[in-house]
Structures are given as C-alpha cells and as structure tokens.
C-alpha cells in the first residue's frame, strides 16, 4: 500500500520533475508526499584549501549560513507553488487532510535518504547524472541503505494522464526482479494495462514468466507477455517498453553489487543512463 512518498530535494533544477511524478502517484493512491530539503551545512560551503584566520572564517561561516537560509526560503516558496499546481493540499490547508509536507534537514542527501526513506513506501529521485557525478550515492542509499523501491524521473519530463496507466515489467526470474514486482503491486494493480517484458539471459531456477502471469492473476491483474530476442537486454527493455506504449517501467536493480556494476558495467546502470521514461526499481 502506497501511503507515504519521500521526495528528497536540493538545488539541482529537478524539483519540478520529481514533485510532479510524486503528485501524480499521490493522487492515484491517496498518499502523502513528504518533501525533504537536504540543506548543505555552512562548513561545506566554505572554500577548500585556503587558509583563513579566525575572524575571516567566522564572517564566511555567517555568510554561508545566510545564503543557506535564503536558498531554503526560495525553495520552500517554489515547492508551495508547485504543490498547488500539481493538486496537492498543503499541510496547513484547512480544507482537508494534509497530503504534502515540507521539512528541512541538514546533511548529505544520501544520509537523509537513508534515514527518512526507511519508513517511506516509495522514494522518488531524479535520474542520476553520471557525467556530473550527481545522484549515484542517493540512489545507492535508497536501494541499499533504506531498502525501499525507488522511482527514477529522467530529465525535465512532466507526467501526463497516461503516467503509470500502462506499466511494463521487466522479468528475468531474479531476486531483484521479484522484489520489484512485490514493491510495485499497488501501482500495477491501478494500471489499465500491464505488459511483462522478458528475454535475454534468464535466472536459472528462477520463476518463469508464466508463473508471474499466474501470480498477477491471483491478485486480479491481467498481464500480457512480450518476449524479445537479443543479447542487449537494457536496449531491448527500453525499446519494447516504448513499442508497447508503456509509460512506466518496473525492473529489479543491481543483481550484482552496486560497486561491481559501477566498475565493470551492468544492465541496471545502462538502463538508467539510457532511459527517457520513468523507472520504478527495487533491489
């Protein structure tokens, strides 16, 4: 059951994207969106490698604190405006129960995700930007540290009425894929159409795609099976998701360790790098 959606944000220009996707799911499932601003500590805004006397350090610390206050105030205003545009009630709205909250927490985003995410039903993050070294640690913290399913939102994509109405599920019989299926049941159940995409190298001794169809059927979910050939599973998954007209892809994440996939490459990283559609994943 999806009732609590965590949206950690910072000044990376992705606030509108993650909040829009969160709002769409919150309205579908009558859930609460909890926005957490990860505020940089003043010491982290200080210039590195430059010797400073005590007076200069004190002045710069005060200036850094004031800058952080202005950024927080500005971001809170943006979030309040966007929440209204996306149909979310503010926590102080007298017209109904709160379904959007805002909090500010000092510290690294990965640490905030790890702490706040453990009691969330879903964590919504922007697509990591490998070239800028942004977002990888937050994704790792969500999947491994918090152990929760994660919705990755690419680019400046804004969801429309078709979002999560046709869900594609990548299936290879692996443990991460099974966890992704279990973690996404509410979303899949609410979808109008479900397509199971399967092909490439399947897990030995793992459940078959026909068994997954039966698993869904027991829960009142009718799923079509789309089989694909080819050794490049990431490309095939994304291409077939687009071909069948899906607006959300569900996959298992990192069959190997995160570090191994980062060093030697892996299917999860390639899917994340290439995707132009939202992806829900679980480890």
Image (cartoon, grey):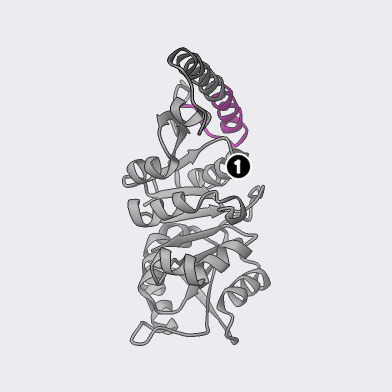
Residue 87 forms part of the magenta stretch? yes
Q: Is residue 131 above or below residue 39?
A: below
Q: Is residue 209 visible?
A: yes
How far across and down, in percent of the image, does residue 16 sit? 61, 39
Horizontal side, residue 148 vs residue 237: left or right = left
Q: Which residue appears at 49% of the width and 59% of the height?
A: 280
Q: Which residue appears at 65% of the width and 73% of the height?
A: 239
Identify the image quadrant of the C terminus.
bottom left
Residue 207 forms part of the magenta stretch? no
Tell which of 256 and 102 is nearer to you.
Answer: 256
Tell which of 265 and 92 is nearer to you.
Answer: 265
Tell which of 241 and 276 is nearer to you.
Answer: 276
Quadrant assignment, res 249: bottom right
Q: Is residue 97 visible?
A: no
Q: Secondary structure at mark 1?
A: loop
How far across and down, in percent of the image, does residue 107 sit? 40, 34
Q: Main secondary structure of the magenta part?
A: helix
Which residue is disc 1 drawn over?
A: 14
Q: Is residue 155 above or below residue 255?
A: above
Q: Which residue appears at 36% of the width and 52% of the height?
A: 1
Q: Is residue 176 above or below residue 126?
A: below
First to last magenta residue range? 74-90
How far across and down, in percent of the image, does residue 57 sit? 47, 18
Quadrant assignment, res 259: bottom left
């Amino acid at each position: 059951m999806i009732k609590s959606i965590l949206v950690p944000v910072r000044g990376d220009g992705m606030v509108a994207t993650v909040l829009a996707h969160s709002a769409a799911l919150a309205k579908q499932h009558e859930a609460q969106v909890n926005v957490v601003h990860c505020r940089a500590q003043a010491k982290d805004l200080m210039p590195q490698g430059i010797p400073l006397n005590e007076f200069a350090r004190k002045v710069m610390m005060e200036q850094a604190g004031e800058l952080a206050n202005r950024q927080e105030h500005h971001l809170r205003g943006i979030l309040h405006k966007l929440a209204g545009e996306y149909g979310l009630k503010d926590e102080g709205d007298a017209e109904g129960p709160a379904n959007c909250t805002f909090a500010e927490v000092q510290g690294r985003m990965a640490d905030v995700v790890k702490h706040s995410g453990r009691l969330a039903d879903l964590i919504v993050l922007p697509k990591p930007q490998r070239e800028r070294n942004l977002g990888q640690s937050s994704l790792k913290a969500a999947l491994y540290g918090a152990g929760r399913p994660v919705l990755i939102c690419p680019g400046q994509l804004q969801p429309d009425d078709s979002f999560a109405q046709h869900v594609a599920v990548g299936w290879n019989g692996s443990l991460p894929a099974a966890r992704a299926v279990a973690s996404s049941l509410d979303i899949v159940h609410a979808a109008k159409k479900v397509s199971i995409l399967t092909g490439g190298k399947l897990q030995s001794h793992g459940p078959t795609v026909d068994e997954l169809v039966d698993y869904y059927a027991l829960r009142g979910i009718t799923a079509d099976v789309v089989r694909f050939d080819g050794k490049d599973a990431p490309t095939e998954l994304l291409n077939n998701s687009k071909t069948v007209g899906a607006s959300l892809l569900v996959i298992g994440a990192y069959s190997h360790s995160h570090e191994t996939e980062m060093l030697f490459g892996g299917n999860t990283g390639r899917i994340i790098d290439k995707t132009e559609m939202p992806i829900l994943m679980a480890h």
